[in-house]
């Protein structure tokens, strides 16, 4: 299946629109964007982009849609999401192929990302019958104290290139069952997958009773479009995934208008290997966590903290495993590492490794791959760097397959090393010692939003709340009670008696 047939099968025209408000498509008033595949640099499509005025129109349309969608019973809203999940099942292969073309992911990871969309639709469908509040005991006689959860309003979604469809689905599936339309600004590097998702969702919306057309809005564009989205008074919640710098700017702009932010930012994740660890398991988990997706996951393993007694053996086994991995065209079945997203990512990796050398690091691997890979792409060997935990380079996340290795003597020291970075997304420990595992998961252990035992830092399930602390932003998406982000709480007191007693025993009349 070539790129043109994939794009055509998913309804993406050439040039692609820059603004989609439900069934209405418009090139947009912003500059045209040319989208190149990271596989070989080939031009996939050109798309329009939205001006701030376009964004304002899209947000206003989503607000109008909200006024009717909020009154639809939540289980009926869940049925729309169920049907969308079925459409995704029918187009899993094509959408996965587009993710590979536009983001450079290997086929299994790309289709796994679409499967994640399907899974969260199933989760949200069940959730649509469980948006419950509490009944609370009132101190006043013949009064009932309770809380309800109501739809919040249109949700603005800003997503990153590395998960071009899954992160949108986490937000969209939950937002729709909670009664909220969505306005999505995808990464400028991956707008085609956004257009495809919108077209697939619109197939359901157009045929669904009581669904307003503008439940889904897409605004392609640059940072000016993003600022207009963040500043819109019609969007009470902005969910943004990306760099710490981007998230800080978004959070400040949203706070200036007293809106809500849900931020999923940088990771800089660590994994501790103790003397009792099963190294067979650890090698497999570390390899995928460190080099999967060419190191371009927010949960990628960046720092490996190994006990002094097992470091030499583990490093040797990892280097052997990494040397056996084929790097190349992600469309080929035996390839496990595809390209970096672009030249800037390759240069960032080279710069980080240069800094590591200056700070005393010993580098294994790294460097451009130029043979047996498509010309025009940026393919790299994963790098392992033995370096002191005090080196400043390890404080910053480089979005590439670089894994820094530190050694430790006592578990408390390892946990301290792990926690002494500004980010706090994902973490893991490999140990067969129950006490060590429990300490790691305790308040005195990992300070991250995700703390795993005997699995890697990547591969979170949709059933758990996903997100991190500190400069990772504090947001939570997907499972558990993350749905509460997309709703507003109302506390109700109902007096069914014949008197007006005041709380706290206050007497007034």
Image (cartoon, helix red, strand yellow):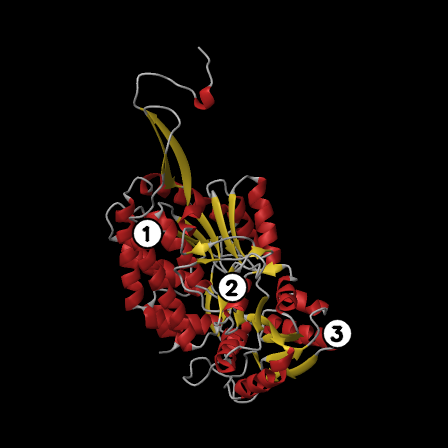
Q: CA distance from mark 1 to mark 3?
A: 50 Å
**Badge 2 vs badge 1, beta-carbon distance below 8 Å:** no
Q: Residue at x 34, y 23 (%)?
A: 141
Q: CA distance from mark 2 to mark 1?
A: 31 Å
Q: Which residue is mark 2?
A: 438
Q: Which residue is mark 1?
A: 127
| Residue mark closest to the camera, 2 vs 3 | 2
Residue at the limit of the structure toward the top, as seen here: 509
The x and y percentages for residue 183 are 43, 50
Label drawn at residue 2: none
As helix, strand or loop, the secondary structure at mark 3 comes to loop
Say whether residue 167 is left or right of residue 223. left
As helix, strand or loop, the secondary structure at mark 1 comes to helix
Q: Earlier in the sequence, mark 1 or mark 3?
A: 1
As helix, strand or loop, the secondary structure at mark 2 comes to helix
**Is residue 275 among the parts visible in the rendering?**
yes
Q: Residue at x 42, y 40 (%)?
A: 488
Quadrant housing the N terminus: bottom left
The x and y percentages for residue 384 are 62, 79
Sort mark 3 into few (<14), some (14-19) or many (20+) by Cα contacts within 10 Å. Answer: some
Hey, which quadrant is residue 194 in on the image? Answer: bottom left
| Residue mark closest to the camera, 2 vs 1 | 2
Does 440 appear above or below 500?
A: below
Q: Earlier in the sequence, mark 2 or mark 1?
A: 1
**Is residue 366 among the parts visible in the rendering?**
no
Q: Nearer the viewer, residue 420 or 235?
A: 420
Quadrant housing the C terminus: top left
Does 484 appear above or below 465?
A: above
Q: Residue at x 54, y 61 (%)?
A: 425
Say whether residue 132 is left or right of residue 278. left
Q: Which residue is mark 3?
A: 359
Q: Nearer the viewer, residue 280 or 91?
A: 280
């Amino acid at each position: 299946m070539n790129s043109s047939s994939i794009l055509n099968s998913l309804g993406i025209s050439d040039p692609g629109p820059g603004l989609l408000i439900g069934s209405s498509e418009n090139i947009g008033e912003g500059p045209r964007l040319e989208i190149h595949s990271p596989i070989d640099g080939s031009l996939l499509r050109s798309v329009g982009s939205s001006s701030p005025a376009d964004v304002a129109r899209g947000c206003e349309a989503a607000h109008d849609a909200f006024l009717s969608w909020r009154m639809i019973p939540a289980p009926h809203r869940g049925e729309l999401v169920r049907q969308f999940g079925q459409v995704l099942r029918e187009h899993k292969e094509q959408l996965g192929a587009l993710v590979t073309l536009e983001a450079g992911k290997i086929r299994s990871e790309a289709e796994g990302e679409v499967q994640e969309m399907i899974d969260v639709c199933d989760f949200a469908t069940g959730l649509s019958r469980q948006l419950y509040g509490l009944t609370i005991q009132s101190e006043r006689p013949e009064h009932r104290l309770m809380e309800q959860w109501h739809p919040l309003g249109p949700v603005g979604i800003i997503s990153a290139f590395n998960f071009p469809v899954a992160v949108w689905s986490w937000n969209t599936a939950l937002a729709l069952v909670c009664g909220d339309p969505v306005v999505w600004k995808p990464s400028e590097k991956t707008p085609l997958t956004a257009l495809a998702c919108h077209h697939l969702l619109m197939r359901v919306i157009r045929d669904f009773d009581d669904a307003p057309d503008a439940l889904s809005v897409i605004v392609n564009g640059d940072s000016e479009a993003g600022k207009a989205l963040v500043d819109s008074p019609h969007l009470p919640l902005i969910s943004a995934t990306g760099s710490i710098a981007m998230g800080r700017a978004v959070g400040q702009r949203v706070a200036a208008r007293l809106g809500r932010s849900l931020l999923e930012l940088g990771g800089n994740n660590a994994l501790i290997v103790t003397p009792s660890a099963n190294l067979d398991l650890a090698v497999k988990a570390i390899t995928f966590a460190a080099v999967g997706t060419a190191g371009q996951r927010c949960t990628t393993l960046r720092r490996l903290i190994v006990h002094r007694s097992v470091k030499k053996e583990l490093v040797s086994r990892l280097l052997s495993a990494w040397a056996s991995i084929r790097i190349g065209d992600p469309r080929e079945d035996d390839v496990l590492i595809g390209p970096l997203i672009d030249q800037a990512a390759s240069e960032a990796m080279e710069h980080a490794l240069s800094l590591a050398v200056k700070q005393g690091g010993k580098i294994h691997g790294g460097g451009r791959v130029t043979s047996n890979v498509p010309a025009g792409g940026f393919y790299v060997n994963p790098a392992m760097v033995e370096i002191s935990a005090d080196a400043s380079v390890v404080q910053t996340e480089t979005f590439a397959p670089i894994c820094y290795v530190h050694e430790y003597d006592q578990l408390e020291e390892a946990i301290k090393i792990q926690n002494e970075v500004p980010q706090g997304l994902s973490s893991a420990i490999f140990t067969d010692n129950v006490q060590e595992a429990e300490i790691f998961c305790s308040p005195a252990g990992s300070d991250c939003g995700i703390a795993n035992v005997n699995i890697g830092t990547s591969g979170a399930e949709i059933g758990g709340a996903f997100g991190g602390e500190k400069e990772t932003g504090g947001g939570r998406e997907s499972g558990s009670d993350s749905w509460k982000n997309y709703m507003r709480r109302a506390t109700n007191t109902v007096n069914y008696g014949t008197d007006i007693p005041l709380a706290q025993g206050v007497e007034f009349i």
